[in-house]
Image (tube, rainbow, N blue to C red):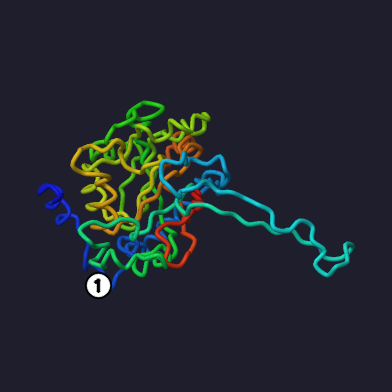
Amino acid sequence: MSLANDFVELAKRVSNWGRWGDDDERGTLNLIDADAVRRGAACVRTGKTFSLALPLNEDGPQTGVIPGRDNPAHRMVAINMAFTGDPDAFATSDDAVSMGLQAATHWDALAHVSYGGFLYNGFPASSVTEAGAAHCGVDKAGTIVTRGVLLDVARARDVERVEGGHAIGADDLEAARELAKVDVQPGDVVVVRTGQIQVLHSGDKDAYGHPSPGPGIGAVPWFRDHDIAAVATDNLTFEVFPCERDDLFLPVHLLDLRDIGLTQGQNWDLEALAADCADDGVYSFLLEASPQPFTGATGSPVNPIATK
């Protein structure tokens, strides 16, 4: 099935292919320059820190809908083992974990999705094999340290949670930006709060993400025009779900990752940070959110740290 003409035209309009060279595999993360890092560092005033990650355990957000995206399973591989054979000398405990790299709080690499046979910047989709992603894998992302900006769409709409199925558009993002009283600048990472993760905190895991609010197609030009380095949300699907149109499945993923080269994050826990931002009126912060450099991976768990 061919893609709709309006989607194809939007893809051309937001495309960053070739912007940083024909060999580029980092996309908009290239916008995090020294000025962006210094801008983030300048946000540190109180020294308060917030982890934006969910706990890594078997009670994670995954419900089995996506095969192989398993919640973390932890096991001990050594318990107080007498390494030298002398139980009164050095003893050690070790453990291991098995999980889907996109099971909990994570980044999607640019290699995560394709359409038309291509990844971001024209790399062939066939370059993703059982060995992993030869191009645009999460190991190509590098460090992510810059200014973070919270766009609290739920608070801007004066609700605890944005209603399920609401497609967040440019108007929603602008309203949240005005609430934050901040100008989004090139190289910033934008985190979009819908309040959806509160469902997960309530224990009703099966309801988390179905239906889900999230960025819709109308948000994509806003992301591109503001030259943000990456974007993350507090829901399971990142974008609105069910999808806005029957003829396009997860179109925001396609446009962000494949065309813009915009790294996406999902399952970010923004509740404590949002409460603090609402309390002091400061919605920008230093963000450290570097992915784990799994070679050839199409995603990575992350423990994003916001420092105010």
Q: Position of residue 64 (x, y in %)?
A: 45, 41
Q: Residue at x 49, y 53 (%)?
A: 302
Kindly identify the residue that appears in the image at 43 percent across and 55 percent down: 40
Q: Residue furthest toward the left?
A: 5
Q: Which residue is mark 1?
A: 21
Q: SS for tag 1?
A: loop
Residue toward you, 167 or 243: 243
Specify the quadrant of the image occupied by residue 134: bottom left
Is 218 located above or below residue 159 in the figure?
below
As displayed, is residue 250 above or below residue 161? Answer: below
Q: Amino acid at mark 1?
A: Gly
Q: Using the image as rendered, state which of residue 302 and residue 282 is in the foreground.
A: 302
Q: Position of residue 67 (x, y in %)?
A: 43, 47
Q: How many marks?
A: 1
Q: In which image quadrant can residue 196 be found?
A: top left
Name the foreground residue: 21 vs 180: 21
Q: Residues within 10 Å of mark 1 (few under 14, many from 20)?
A: few
Residue 196 lies left or right of residue 224; in this view the side is right
What residue is drawn where x is 32% and y is 42%?
A: 239
* Res. 17 image quadrant: bottom left
Residue 153, position as x, y percentages in the image:
34, 35
Q: Position of residue 73 (x, y in %)?
A: 58, 49
